[in-house]
Amino acid sequence: MSLSASSAPSPRGWRARLAGATAFRFESLLVLAALVAVMAVLSPVFLSVSNFLNIVLSTSVIGVLAIGMTFVICSAGIDLSVGSLVGLSGVVGALTTANLGLPWPACILACLAAGAFAGSVNGFLITKGGIPPFIATLGMLGVARGVALVLSNGVSIYGLPPEVVYLGQGRPLGVPTPVIVLLVVAFAAHVALIHTRFGVYAQVIGDNEAAARAMGVRVERHKVLLYALSGLLAGLAGLLFAARINSGEPTAGLNYELTAITATIIGGTNLFGGRGSVIGTIIGAMIMGVLQNGLNLLAVQPFYQQIAIGAVLVLAVWLDRVNSAEGWRR
Amino acid sequence: MSLLELRDVRKSFGAIEALRGATFSVEAGAVVGLVGDNGAGKSTLMKTITGVYRPDGGDIRFDGASLVGKDPGEIRKAGIEMIYQDLALARMRDVAANIFLGRELTRSVLGVKLIDSKRMRGEAEAMIAKLGARVKSVTQIAGQLSGGQQQSVAIARALTFNPKLVIMDEPTAALAVREVEHVLELIRTLSGHGIAVILISHRLTDVFAVCDRIVVLRQGAVIADDPTRGTTMNAVVAHIVGAAEPARQGEPQ
């Protein structure tokens, strides 16, 4: 790492300015464009409007998860439980109407509360229990999935109220509701990450936790809030997923944590904490969506898609390591 | 009444007694040197004052109020700033953000408190200029600055909020000779403005140059507390290494 005092002013111009505001990585846009170009050539239906809506629709669940993941990774943490929380919250939400007969707002609240509660448990295990985030959320990955299967007896729970189903299947002005939800969440999260103490402290904790504590940031409390937020957004993603397929599915969101982490890292959020970008994360999620959609259109078996996602994650981190050798990242 | 009063402050980490009842006080505007060998408990004592650690026993009073149980943010608000040896900077954030770390200026937009980066930059610039620090721009990333520049940022942060007491942990250890003189001059200036300073340093020449009093910490307790004029370098060194003191029973080593 270079610490020279009189290093020349950054030669990168507008790119540096763009990156100065956020950790947004310009290259991710190029990757997305290149991927779209390749898919457009390979598949004649790829560039249709309906397929585009398909992609953003399937991206919305991952996108919401990845936004929560962005905050957690910024703080040098990780949340492996989000995929399981998609399943758990969908089941809990479906049960409130299907079994308890409660009205539709209760279904929505139950989904969000299930996610936020599990996320808070993660946060307390990590701060009060001193358990590393990787282990605490890995445990929650198992527990939440298990609870979802127990509550549902391992079968899908049908019978969501129509108001909730509209959240997944509605198309106000032709735009799928989940996409609108994603955009609203992304806007709020972007402002929160860059322009509020909540987001900045998340990044400072990942940058230098001891400094954050010494300067008066309530690090432990803040971490609990970050994992609760990640859980809350996983609950929202679970709600969108259940609403889209009109059922609480205990196996919903399987392996989604892998895709969400990949989207976050591709978008430029530093895997080791300190800096992150919601805009980058959305682009990362789009990359994952285009990749999966394209592979589907090309009739590539889902097994290979898993290979592709895993490879992309490792590739993204490797590129980050190569880049950081010349930058200021630790 | 003293500005800062420590009475019988104790702190253990597991079986290790880092502080075995430290007692001393600092008057307003005084410069107190805190010296001692590695592991004597200097850093633990300072982190107990700043609220990073909670004392197991004893009392710490500042401006008449007890600090025990307060968190680092509240203690900064009370008027105690510390310049840590590692400087405690967020390396990926810019100079302005570091100076206002933990005390960000905000403006309210639709009921949401947004960080007012523009105002923070302006005030950070003014502070850097006032200190005569050689930092080109407050939008530079802290991790890209030289060691001396990083220290300027840490000092600017400590002085921006009108502290009554500034604790400096080895501020001259990593500096070139000319920069050392700058820091010592700063300490004299602070004292002249009625701001008390606790200087932790291994460099006894620096301590003798600026301090009114020298407190020696040994194995978690204060074993000497003399006016600088009433002691000598040899006496202080003897206290630090324990040569001036009859061996106590049951001590490690």
Image (tube, rainbow, N blue to C red):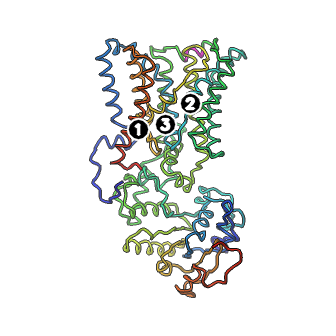
Question: In the rendered image, which residue does mark 2 sit on?
Answer: A82
Assign the magenta stretch its main secondary structure: helix
Tell me where residue A144 appears, x and y as whole percent: 63, 28
Whole-angstrom CA distance, mark 3 to mark 2, is 12 Å
Which residue is painted at 50% across and 46% down in the image? A206
Chain of the residue displaying label 3: A
Q: Quadrant of residue B213?
A: bottom right
Disc 1, SS: helix
Tell me where residue A265 appears, x and y as whole percent: 43, 36
Within-10-Å neighbours for mark 1: few <14, some 14–19, many 20+: some
Relative to residue A209, is residue B7 drawn left or right? right
Disc nearer the start of the sequence (3/1)? 3
Within-10-Å neighbours for mark 3: few <14, some 14–19, many 20+: many
Within-10-Å neighbours for mark 2: few <14, some 14–19, many 20+: many
Which residue is painted at 45% across and 34% down in the image? A264
Q: Report if residue A164 lies within the magenta region.
A: yes
Disc 3, SS: helix
Question: In the rendered image, which residue does mark 3 sit on?
Answer: A70
The residue range painted magenta reads: A163-167
Whole-angstrom CA distance, mark 2 to mark 1, is 20 Å
